[in-house]
Structures are given as structure tokens and as C-alpha cells.
Amino acid sequence: SQGALAALRCGAALPTVDGKQATWDRIVGDADISNHDLYALCESFFRGSQQELTRPYYLRYFSDLPTTAAIRNGWVVELSCMASFPRFAASGDAVAAADALLAREDLDHFVRRAVSDGTDDLRRLSSRPAERPGVRFTQGDLGAVAYAVIGTGERTLVVSPGFVCHIEIALEHPRFRAFFDALADRFQVILFD
């Protein structure tokens, strides 16, 4: 049920050492877990606000996740590797570990695809300065509006990400951040929600 999946996501996101270890053990070693349960755990394991807590798992991903191809197959392996990719590990060490894994000739092709995609994002993020734009607020007639400014280009580009958005979470996500950073190379980008 959706309630059970939400409970799994919440449990995987809990910021405790024991909780993270138990979740990791299920992700990499539970051969009997349902696909939906597995994806829920993978999606919620790494959190932007828990980087110190999950840092030990950044490099373990590159050694542990490929072994899951022995207990799972096909898209299940690929989707679980994609969903659990350590997207907040933008560092030279993580990129080097990913490159070493991708150099293996015996690497399952589903794992290879997920790691390759995630590594492209990490490479872009780790090559940029660690600028973290702060979210600011301005008061309008109908309430407060959150916004962030990225880049210093001569022209201004205002981006409205959609009907519902959480700027801080969007800026933590590697693909969104890479997109906004690419825009910021040419513009002063103003994001708001």
C-alpha cells in the first residue's frame, strides 16, 4: 500500500546511525524485498541534510551496489542503483571511485548505466566551486515568496520551476543544480517558488 511505502521512505530517511545501517543492509543484501519496497528505501537513503551521517556510504556505494546484480536482475538493479546513487558526494574521491568501477570489464551493464549517468552529474558538480546560494524571502501582498539568486551575468533570467517547488531541495539535486549552474554561466538566475 502507499502508506506502507511512505513509512519505508520515512524510516530510510531517519537520521540515525543504526537506522541508516539497517536500511543499507536491506538495500544491498535483502534478496526477498519487493521492488517497490526496495525503490522506496533507495530513494530516501541519501538526504542533502544528512551528508555527514551518510558520508561513509558514499564510497561503499561503489563497492556494495554492484554486488546486488547477484541477487537481482535487469531493471531492478538499474533502478535501485539509480535511486540510491550518492548524488551529494560531489568530490574527487567519489568520482575516482566511480571511474574505477566503470573501468571494470565484469561490471553488470545495468549497474554500468546507472553509475555512468550518476557519475556525469557528480563530475559536473565536483568541478564547480561549492557555491551554495542562500534562499531569501520577500514579502508580497499575499504572503512571503522564497527566492535564490545564482550567477552574475549581465542579463537576468527569472525561473519559475512550476506550480509547487522547494528551492533548497531543487538546488541540492545534482541534475537540477547542474542545469541551474549552466544557466548561471551566462545569466544572473533568479529562482522563486
Image (cartoon, rainbow, N blue to C red):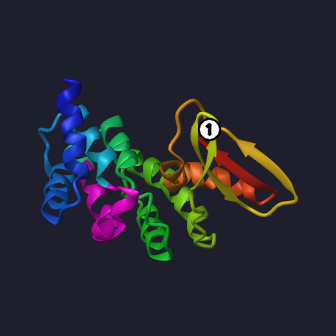
Question: Which of the two residues, 4 or 65, is positioned nearer the viewer here?
Answer: 4
Foreground of the two, 103 or 53? 53
Image coordinates of residue 13 in percent, x first then y, are 26, 51
Give me the residue at 32% from left, 61% from top.
61
Q: Is residue 124 above or below residue 70?
A: below
Instruction: Tell me residue 71's x, y (percent).
Output: 19, 45
Question: Farthest residue in the right direction?
Answer: 154
Residue plotted at (81% across, 57% down): 186
Residue at the far bottom in the pictured view: 93
Would you say the magenta stretch is mainly helix, strand or loop? helix
Residue 66 in magenta stretch: yes
- Which amino acid type corresponds to the residue marked 1 in the rendered image? Pro
Please count the marks in the image. 1
Q: What's the magenta region?
A: 46-68
* Residue marked by disc 1: 161
Quadrant where the C terminus lies?
top right
Residue nearest the viewer, comparing 105 with 28: 28
Residue 101 position within the rendered picture, expressed as x and y whole percent measured from the top left: 41, 64
User: What residue is shown at x 57% (from left), y 29% (from top)?
Assistant: 163
Q: Is residue 6 left or right of residue 176?
A: left
Residue 62: image quadrant is bottom left
Mark 1 residue crowding within 10 angstroms, few (<14) / some (14–19) / many (20+): few
> Is residue 72 among the parts visible in the rendering?
no
